[in-house]
Amino acid sequence: MAQTQYKYMDMIHRCFRCGYCKFPQDWEDVDNCPAYARHRLESHSNGGRLWLIRAWITGELELTDHLAEIIYSCVACKNCEEKCPLSFSDDILNMVIAARAEMVAQGRIPSPVKTYLKNIQLHGNPYGIGAKKRSDWMQELSIEPFEKQEFLFFVGSEGAYDSRAQHAARALSRLFQKAELSFGVLGNDETDDGNEVELLGEEGLVEMLAEKNIASFNERGIKNIITLSPHAYNALKNIYPRFGGSYQVYHYTQILPNLIQSGRLHPPKLENTTITYHDPCFLGRWNREYTAPRRVLQAIGGSKLIEMDRNRKSAFCCGGGSGNYYTDLLGGSDDSPARIRARQAHATGATILAVACPNCLTMLEDAVKVEGLEGKIQVKDIAELIDGESAS
Ligand code: SF4
Ligand code: SF4
């Protein structure tokens, strides 16, 4: 890549590979960066990755398939930004995303990432399932299409297509119906939110997706949007304004506390239950929302909320960001991030691991199974816990 094309050329050399971005709280624990935790190689920490990117930009290193995999091994959790002591810390992830954009332009990206992006381009979702099936998840629920309701429920690709996440989407819809919330959906007119597409560096596709969703919102006069996924929440709140779409966007955990407090929703009692909560990166570090999900969980009668050692801004990531819940570039090991996080949750003694993200839900539930923890700890979306129904 020509040095002049790289947006962060005057900044990237400032990373002096101190390694602070690898450590969460003390020097004994090195599980801060999920990619580094998985591979235990300096190249997969943010400092190492930035040095490799710099060597590529300055022509000292060729862009090989291996280098491409290293650059794509970052799951955009922002844990490194929390720990980097330098003033440029807000941009250390942007430097990786900018390198990916150049790799996309050159067509040099790992093949699972290529498939992920191609599916979204062709079908509007990463699963490669036809757009006409986007509404299948809600068949028995009598959910109205958006017309003039107060809120749009933006379901997202995972809630619409992934069987486990569909369960959470149905639970949340039932809650809205029980609370008589005025809401509607876009149905088959919704398309992927584009959050992961942005992180993977496909700038043209992000624009296309954002413009399509923004056109659907504006045609219907939509002002208020509730998302199931923190990834969609981040895209609609922080990316869409760049393309002219500004709305009041809520993650669903920001809506439930008021519905509970005003008596429109009645959380079930879960006697003698201990719950631990996993902060999703795109609600937590990306958008600083740590309180609302905990308020919802604290409203569950008979249960006790206990924290993992790594919580709030220090929470370890499940490894599902940046499309990795689909591409699985960090899977296949005892040290895959979801398995580490499942062990951290189990260590609290909790019997329920509550999540607020469809990606975390599938990543952590699979990890609990692989770890042999089924029957000891159950992974549940907060919407499922409040809904209280076990069948979809
Ligand atoms: S990104 Fe920041 S914390 Fe990490 S090695 Fe570079 S300077 Fe150090
Ligand atoms: S954003 Fe997360 S995965 Fe990426 S380098 Fe930073 S800590 Fe590692």
Image (cartoon, rainbow, N blue to C red):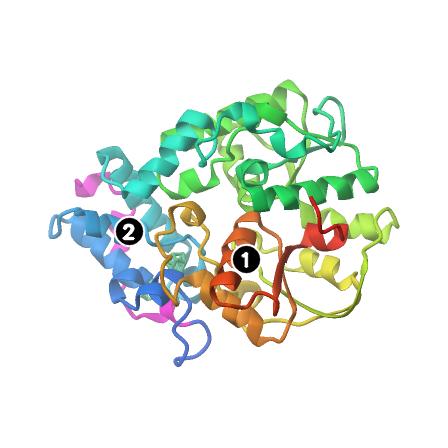
Inspect the image, locate mark 1, and give the three-letter code of the amino acid beneath it: Glu
Q: Is residue 340 one of those drawn in magenta?
A: no
On screen, 383 above or below 203?
A: below
Answer few, some or many: residues within 10 Å of disc 2's Cα (few below 14, many 20 plus, some between 14 and 19).
many
Ligand 1 image-quadrant field: bottom left
Quick check: 109 left or right of 297? Answer: left
Residue extending furthest toward the left: 60
- Would you place residue 298 above or below residue 234 in this image? below
In what quadrant of the picture does the N terminus appear? top left
The image shows residue 225 at horizontal and vertical percentages of 66, 35
Toward which corner of the image does residue 380 lie, by quadrant?
Answer: bottom right
Q: Is residue 238 left or right of residue 151?
A: left
Residue at 56% in and 21% down: 215
Q: Which residue is mark 2?
A: 71
The residue drawn where x is 83% and y is 49% is 265
Q: Earlier in the sequence, mark 1 or mark 2?
A: 2
Q: What is the span of residues highlighted in magenta in the rendered image?
A: 1-23
Residue in view at x 52 percent, y 58 percent: 364
Residue at image mark 1? 365
- Quick one: which residue is furthest to the top in this view? 219
> What element does badge 1 sit on?
helix
In this view, the residue in front, 206 or 90, is 206
Quarter of image, res 198 = top left
Residue 313 position in % (x across, y down): 54, 64
Q: Is residue 43 above or below residue 62?
A: below
Residue 47 picture location, percent across and down:
29, 62
**Image location (x, y in percent) of residue 304:** 74, 71
